[in-house]
Image: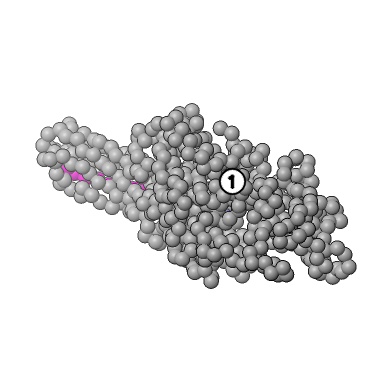
Amino acid sequence: MDFNHYFTNEELETLLPELVSAHPGLTSLRSIGESYEKRPIWLLTLTNTSNGSDSEKPAVWVDANIHATEIAGTTTALRIIYSLLEGYGKDERITRLLDHSAFYIVPRVNPDGAALAMAPQPRYIRSGVRAYPWPEKEEGLHTQDVDGDGRILQMRIQDPNGDWKISSLDPRLMEKRSPTEFGGTYYRLLPEGLIEDYDGYLIKVARQPEGLDFNRNFPFQWRPEGEQEGAGPYPASEPEIKALVDFIIAHPNINVGLTYHTFSRVILRPFSTKADEDMETDDLWVYKKLGNIGTEITGYRNVSTYHDFKYHPKEVTTGAFDDWLYDTLGMYTFTIEQWDLPTEAGIKDRKFIEWHREHPHEEDLQILKWVDEHAVEDAYINWYEFEHPQLGKIELGGWNGMYTWRNPPHCYMDAESARTAPFALAMGDLLPHLRFHTLEVTPLNGDEYHLNLIVENTGFFPTYTSQQAKNRKVARPVRVELELPDGVRLIDGKWRLELGHLEGRSNKLDVTAMGAASPTDNRARVEWVIHSPKSSKIVVKVLSERAGTIYQEVELAN
Ligand SMILES: [Zn+2]
């Protein structure tokens, strides 16, 4: 597999079934729904089916490419799939992961948007292709490839009131005009495009007709258009989002979720809408621990969206996937913004959002130099004259953003996915997992037997995943059931009972050994007295929504 590559829908149609047929018993493929343009939304399930089905095991959710142009995530999702399938039976950890747990992976949530982004004459939209909120094209400038070279660049138009000038550091670059500066040659910069209903004077930047943002359409504090742009007419109104929501609701065995986006090289966690202080404190500690595991693996910083990734200091976003999954279902979820051109070019610890509004112009040169030195093809286009059908003589040039800013240049995709894919495996290491610690039969007088069961959770997470899940009552407590054949009856104890939840190690985060206490709160014990007239076999079944289901047969005999 070549991971210095971006996969088209057509390639996925061939590749995904191939992966399944090459690894029978480890993976299966299904479409969980259709996009607006009727493309399948593929989900791969990965687990060793010979020792239990996926729904009887704890699970990790992974998705990618919900935003149309963020196709880097698809490559990373494929890398996760590939490393699990290739490692099974060879690598002890990966074998344990697929024996004990399941991975649900949607490499491309938004095939319609990706098809546009990867077309020979591309269009870059935020999410889905459905026109929203209005079917008509708005008046104003619509971004598109006007000169037909397959690139969408910038238009540079000379204007004494322009806010840009040619850079003093490198004539290819544009530099912001200072507020107190007069008398130079100035320019307006606009995206390459055509103007709908142009009157010859006024250029308004139109909103794209495809105005949806799928990552605002989840049922978390959904708000209408006037408050949250692109959120759609109601929560999960879009078929792509409904497919995800329906699948996840039907799979309460999921404990953690990772959603791959671009860019910024940052691991984001909930909430988008409120401060850390307003999060369940125990969960915040766990979240920070998980985030730090992510930082160690990827080198990305991990932050709260609310504190460090707000697009506007006084506005929040609602309807995001990670918030929905954690807030409603108590599943620890991260948004991974892969790749960052400024960071790759050596700009350290930049402020993710503020940097785009304010940074030293020298850093623009640093980025351009990096592109030059690393021979990234077609990344920055020197300005050239163009006869625009509406604006007359203008210039085209500047950043060709798709494989520079929005996604890694092709030759950097392998390295980027190699650093981010292992985070998904690490999340699998943390899942709760049930195990029979002790299951013993002791013959009593006559036809009676004593059955002693001790079951334990061997995972880092408890069997309820998070306090939030507990508060929301969305993780059913652990239960035990006995299957008794005819003629066998209970003298003492019940055939079905609730054990409550079993803790993991996530409630033992203190690192001071002095005074430490590690109680066995991950175990539960049950005893029965059973009457069995002749030798018979019974089945002990322990069920947990989040930690899976385990069975064991025991024989009642002297
Ligand atoms: Zn995104």
The image shows residue 178, relative to residue 70, as above or below, that is: below
Residue 303 at x, y = what percent?
A: 60, 56
Residue name at image x 44 percent, y 63 percent: 235
The magenta segment is 523-530
Q: Main secondary structure of the magenta part?
A: strand
The one nearer the camera, 19 or 278, is 19
The image shows residue 101, relative to residue 251, as above or below, that is: above
Residue 187 at x, y = what percent?
A: 79, 62
Residue under label 1: 119
Using a 10 Å C-alpha cutoff, classify the residue at mark 1 as few (fewer than 14 neighbours), some (14 to 19) or many (20 or more): few
Left or right of residue 496, residue 124 in this image: right
Residue 505 at x, y = what percent?
A: 46, 48
In the current view of this chain or complex, which residue is farthest to the top?
90
Left or right of residue 405, residue 156 in this image: right
Secondary structure found at label 1? loop
The one nearer the camera, 98 or 314, is 314
What sort of colour scheme is used for the picture? one colour
In the rendered image, residue 526 lying in the magenta stretch gets the answer: yes
Determine the image quadrant of residue 297: top right
Residue name at image x 61 percent, y 49 percent: 122
The image shows residue 555, relative to residue 61, as above or below, that is: above
Residue name at image x 45 percent, y 58 percent: 238
